Image (cartoon, helix red, strand yellow):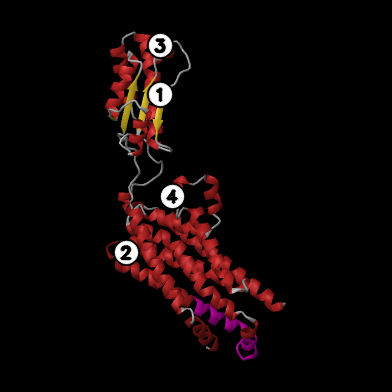
Amino acid sequence: MQVFKAFIKISRQSIGIILTYTIIFIVFLEMMSRFNSTATASEFTESSINIAVIDNDNSSLSNNLLKYIDSKHNIIDIDTDIDDIRDAMYRRSVDYVLIIPENFYENIIAGNNISLESYKLPDSVAAEFVELQLNNFISVYTAYIDMLDNSDLAYEKTANVLKAEAEVSVSGSTSSDEISIPHYFYMFLTYILLSVIVMCITPILITMNTEEIKIRTLCSSLSSVKRNIFIAISTFSLGLIIFLLFTVFSLIRFSSDMFSTVGMLRILNCFIYMIVCLGISFSAGVFLKNRNTVSMLANVIGLGSSFLTGVFVDRSLLAPSVLAVGKFLPCYWYINVENELLRFGNHNTRTIIYGYGMQILFAIVLFALGIVFSKSKKSE
């Protein structure tokens, strides 16, 4: 009982830290879950810009090129004086100025290496895309004019070719409309829960394992076994309080989703992961001697496991080698269960149970490592 009282007395100093971290992370979770749930798949949309054309060639190629530009962008009249061009670009009334040199069409047909001249804004992505459009048109148009020897028909066929579009999608991704906010909340909770537990509980365990407190405890009638049991109970109780803070928030915030079979399975998954986090904190409390290194450890483990297992980056974008490394982390199996729960009634029960089991194995190994190292330190 004295050990429990000592643990509570030390933990009182961390109440402010626990509440501060918990509140900050709850706000962070809410913002991240909302941001990701409302994000839609990015699509490329072709936009029009203001283009000025100075045609010094006046050939079928230049006329049809002008016609093509007019169908895609806004053609602006401008004086040919260089100062007027610079003033227009400075005012952003023109984004791109194209100059077609004399005998441009004849040189292209003859196979001479000649290029269009232009003025454009520095580092303009739109200007680069316009040049790509122009080069594509010239390449296709000259090919058709060689075959057909008819400028109108060549332009028609060129325009049809350049209208072709490719549908692009991210393989293996899920539409954001099909993903609920609780999913994102419990995804990011892996990083948050680990960070809060390690940063709040590990310093207490380091203090409990200092020589002064250990010697005083061993001098009493309390055996080392009972001492460790009381420390384990105290650690679990504090971890349970942190877990309940996040769980109660999710039950209130997402009541319609959480009071269901999927919601209960999410909570169970989070509870098991909480035990894993306690195992990490327990082992760290035995290994570490300096409280100042706890924050660094929490960030390294939390951020590292989150990036390697698909918390911050979707698994469809991660390399197989990265996911292979992630399998050696308990967070990977937590995310496995969470991703499986996205299927709602069609989820694979075997995958969920296997994910639970792997996390429990990690927890057992972590606690065993901490106990073994603690006994080795005691024998020394």
Circle 4 residue = 314
- Between circles 2 and 4, the one closer to the viewer is 4
- Between circles 2 and 3, the one closer to the viewer is 3
| Magenta stretch holds residue 229 | yes
Residues in magenta, as a range: 215-235
**Within-10-Å neighbours for mark 1: few <14, some 14–19, many 20+:** some
Q: Earlier in the sequence, mark 2 or mark 4?
A: 2
Which circle marks residue 258 in the picture? 2
Q: Earlier in the sequence, mark 1 or mark 4?
A: 1
Q: CA distance from mark 4 to mark 3?
A: 52 Å
Q: Earlier in the sequence, mark 4 or mark 3?
A: 3
Q: CA distance from mark 2 to mark 4?
A: 23 Å
Determine the secondary structure under disc 2.
helix
Residue type beneath disc 2: Met
State the residue in front, 290 or 347. Answer: 290
Q: CA distance from mark 2 to mark 3?
A: 72 Å
Does residue 192 show up? yes
Q: Residue furthest right?
A: 380
Residue type beneath disc 1: Asn
Circle 1 residue = 135
Circle 3 residue = 106
Looking at the picture, how far across and down is residue 77, in whole percent?
27, 27
Determine the secondary structure under disc 3.
helix
